[in-house]
Image (cartoon, rainbow, N blue to C red):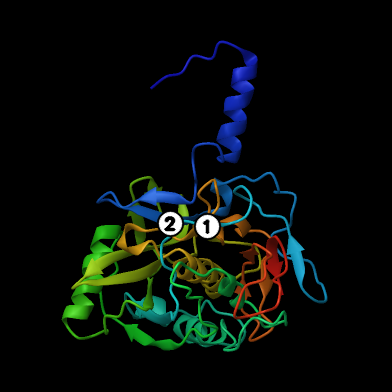
Amino acid sequence: MKIRLVASCAGLFLASWLVFGQARHNPFEDRSDTGETVKVLPTPASIRSPHDTQPSDAPVHRGTSVYPASYGSGNLLYHNGRIMANPRYYAIYWNGAVANSTSTSLGYATISAQVASFAASFAKGTNWSNDPADDYEIVQQYNDSTGASPAATLPYDGTFVDGQSTKSSIKDSAIRTYLAGLFNGGKVPADANTIYGVYFPSGMRVSLTGGASCSSFCGYHSHFSYNGLQIKYAVFPYPDCSGCRLTGKTVADMLTIVGSHEIREAVTDPGDNNANAWYDSAGYEADDKCAWHNLYQMANGGFWVQPEYSNGIKIAPIGLPYPGPGCIVP
């Protein structure tokens, strides 16, 4: 549909709306080829923020730092759905080309080894206490109507390396069918409390209704029903393309940055059973609000991750007030 602007002020308004994408369009949402809403992490170049003056990497600091949200509007709001109270993580590699890739850092031999160590280190295993290892525990403030809060643990359940041939592209519906096939074949256990991270090799594009990986997004999380279970999964295209590459970061570094985003959001807003949990008044989830700014290395292991948004509240059973509101770098 074409729109004819009749006044310069209308043009200015429309331009602002298109730049910031906060009035009617959420760039962190797309749709599967079968119509379901999918929560994506757009490429750094495909989104703009009123706070683009903030650096990509957080400055060196001592103690917890709070930075303005890059996107969205106000604090996160609760929308009556359930969070993941006891999440786990399982890594699935399409083939050995991605699992055994050596585009790593921190001395790891392969991407699968680095991702496994990151996933096992992301949660420190004790409740949030405002210490340098609280990279994941900010999510504990986001409880649900059942009274459940996310546990301080995120067990890493294992790695599965498949032998699929690298294809030029794959659709979201095919990824869900692929996961169901792994469950049916007994290759991977099906569990509603597990986030399945699916990693694809270089050159294999993932497509959604609004675009494809590398040009439109660097990863996403979603869910589907399997034998009465709500399966949560995150999709990780290989980030060696210009759209998903940041200066000084290896492929493995980019995967842990995108991984921190998708894991936390799958916990705080899994969206299963057609009931959403935590996002702000503009529809932005917790990690959307902090995307691509003030990236930092974890105190535990040195893995690159992004900040998590905090409402800055005090909530039982933790007892301590969280820092914020804003994006938290421990």
Q: Position of residue 86 (x, y in %)?
A: 44, 81
Q: Position of residue 48 (x, y in %)?
A: 61, 45
Q: In the image shown, does 39 or 193 lie closer to the viewer?
A: 193
Q: Quadrant of residue 198?
A: bottom left
Within-10-Å neighbours for mark 1: few <14, some 14–19, many 20+: many
Could one spot residue 272 in this view of the protein?
A: yes
Q: Quadrant of residue 146?
A: bottom left
Mark 2 and 1 residues: CB-CB less than 8 Å, in contact?
yes
Could one spot residue 200 in this view of the protein?
A: no
Within-10-Å neighbours for mark 2: few <14, some 14–19, many 20+: many
Residue sitting at 56 percent across and 81 percent down?
Answer: 122
Mark 2 = which residue? 39
Residue sitting at 38 percent across and 22 percent down?
Answer: 1
Q: Which mark is residue 285?
A: 1
Q: In the image shown, does 95 or 293 lie closer to the viewer?
A: 293
Q: Quadrant of residue 184?
A: bottom left
Residue sitting at 41 percent across and 65 percent down?
Answer: 237
Is tag 2's residue or tag 1's residue first in the polypeptide sequence? 2
Image quarter hosting the C terminus: bottom right
User: Which callout, 2 or 1, points to the residue nearer the camera?
Assistant: 1
| SS type, badge 1 | loop
Q: Amino acid at mark 2?
A: Lys
Left or right relative to 181: residue 10:
right
Please tell me whether residue 145 is drawn above or below residue 214 in the rendered image: below
Q: In the image shown, does 117 or 153 lie closer to the viewer?
A: 153
